[in-house]
Image: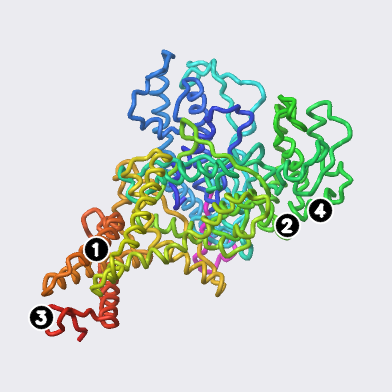
Amino acid sequence: PREGATLVTANTILSILAADYPVEKLACYVSDDGGALLTFEAMAEAASFANMWVPFCRKHKIEPRNPESYFNLKKDPTKNKVLSDFVKDRRRVKREYDEFKVRINSLPDSIRRRSDAYHAREELIAMKEQRLKKEDEPVEAVKIKKATWMADGTHWPGTWLTPAADHSKGDHAGIIQVMLKPPSDEPLHGIGEEYSVIDLSNVDIRLPMLVYVSREKRPGYDHNKKAGAMNALGGDRICYVQFPQRFEGIDPSDRYANRNTVFFDGNMRALDGLQGPVYVGTGCLFRRIALYGFDPPRAKEHSAGFCSCCFGHRKKHAGIANTPEENRALRMGDSDDEEMNLSLAPKMFGNSNLLIDSIPVAEFQGRPLADHPSVKNGRLPGALTIPREPLDASTIAEAISVISCWYEDKTEWGQRVGWIYGSVTEDVVTGYRMHNRGWKSVYCITKRDAFRGTAPINLTDRLHQVLRWATGSVEIFFSRNNAFLASSRMKVLQRIAYLNVGIYPFTSVFLIVYCFLPALSLFSGQFIVQTLNVTFLIYLLIITITLCALAVLEVKWSGIELEEWWRNEQFWLIGGTSAHLAAVFQGLLKVIAGVEISFTLTSKSAGDEDEDDFADLYMVKWTSLMIPPIVIIMVNLIAIAVGVSRTIYSVIPQWSRLLGGVFFSFWVLAHLYPFAKGLMGRRGRTPTIVYVWSGLIAITISLLWVAINPPSGANQNQIGGSFQFP
């Protein structure tokens, strides 16, 4: 909860529950990595409010279905609404939502007060018991662990506000709670206005299933961060379709290129023409059998009688299933293939019989519809429209064992099955493994945004985010997931795309050199090239035309304006000279010295209504990642001053050399302008440490260069004609 706003989480859950999708086919699983009671109770509040919000959305076709976004719309809410009671319903739901927000925002204090009250009661009971045991002796103060209490008066099994053994962020039990039970198969209409806040007599009031999951964590067991949490949540009816992510709460100028439109609307669209876009960790729907390690059907399938999967070739029944139930009943044990033996399944998937039995069912669910003669081994229309089995105690107990920290031991979870472990960017690695097995992914851009999220608008937080991405890319480059080692099932151009994912942080080394070259030319009095001959000018013209053509294509394909394109270019240099460079060093340390890389969560803004929406944008938080760009700025400014002074006081001023060096230095500084603006904060106040470090490093580099390569003037005896290091 400290890393993300609880209200944002609750609104996201409500938008999923209200999705315009068959309710019996939709389920929402919320994975709480921290095991916090705050998230649990916020989900309970969201489930309660969903009983009004979801039917309201269905009745009046509300868009967007995120309550906070909907009630903050600037346009007329009555536009295209035809029911006469819309205004009245909206007013009542808005009032209920305001009360819902108050309850959500008061949860932290409510949980703390409740826990303090129960703790005081426990201390009184303990002192009373001690007084009864020792009637004649003075009663000493009794120390009891300060637990976090649930509303029903029991201890919270997850992380406590005051961490204790078995109740800390890295040491707590597994928790599964069904907040909303699976819906019935038939529509269920609500009641009239006289018994409800709004009239729901002709509205389907069923809600999708909502489940809270917090997997078990214990010391000594690597929980593998997000990848481990996702492996505990492998759901059904999912496939690999990647959607672009759109962001809310970004400053109007998008100072640090958070929208990343060139990537989402340019690069990802281009990859869609190859083997498919990479998995970016969010906004993605998966095919379950692909996560289970299945090969794509056409990778090994040479005839209609075989199905290729992670167990090898599986021969089908000689007979054809006559009913959907018979078709769904196919199990792994039906084949004589040795690789399909049930005894091998626990080595891959663990010892959960329910999970193993669900794998062939998932394979059947992933088949295309047999609604065309060209479709072979498909499923009949309506084959999946069966009621869900009720959740009994034994099913929940087995689910608890699956999310335990020891379940994955000696299995292939995280190695071949599920989300892949071993990298801070497990999303890219997971998508790479699927493409490497021959799968294809699809990029889908909808008219209305399918996924929306928040992004860090603070400079330091944004640099940490880029550092994590770049570090993961370096890890991929030095691992067996390098695209050089890809199988023959991966297409050549797709391989090049993944090579670019692993190599791009290394361009920071050349960027650093390019950023210092103009300054060094001004210090030395020599231009970057000795003579401006025709060959150099032709090369320069070709490079310039190529870069301009690339810029025009990026603007055209991404549908952005020049200002946004320029923001992307600026932050490319900012990230390249700071986070990417640090990622290269971190990756080399991990490969050479075995130094583990710490995982830094991205802090994202979720300010209160009474605060400035962009307060984080102006907050200056020091980080060592700022040192290289600051040094580049200071060195180039000093170099410009040195170059101008030398030229002015020279007997024969070399204005052409000065203009060339100053132009390239200003070009570097123009790219770093958003970075410098971020250092200024709201009131132009920069931490003293920024000036101290940047000044010392810039002066040291400048003096060292002058000492190593002192500039020579036309005449050493002329005043101002040259510089001598004292």
Residue contact at pointers 4 and 1, CB within 8 angstroms: no
CA distance for labels 1 and 3: 24 Å
Type of amino acid under label 3: Ile
- Residues drawn in magenta: 131-149
Horizontal side, residue 486 vs residue 588: left or right: right
Q: What element carries label 1?
A: helix
Residue located at (39% from left, 33% from top): 98
N-term-proximal mark, 2 vs 3: 2
Spatial CA distance of label 3 from label 4 is: 86 Å
Per the image, label 3 sits on a secondary structure element best described as loop
Q: In this view, does 9 lie to the left or right of 223?
A: left
| Residue identified by numbered label 1 | 660
Q: In which quarter of the image is the C terminus?
A: bottom left
Which of discs 2 and 3 lies nearer the camera? The answer is 3
Which residue is at the front of the view, 57 or 674? 674
The residue at which mark 4 appears reads as 344
Residue 181: tell me if it is visible.
yes
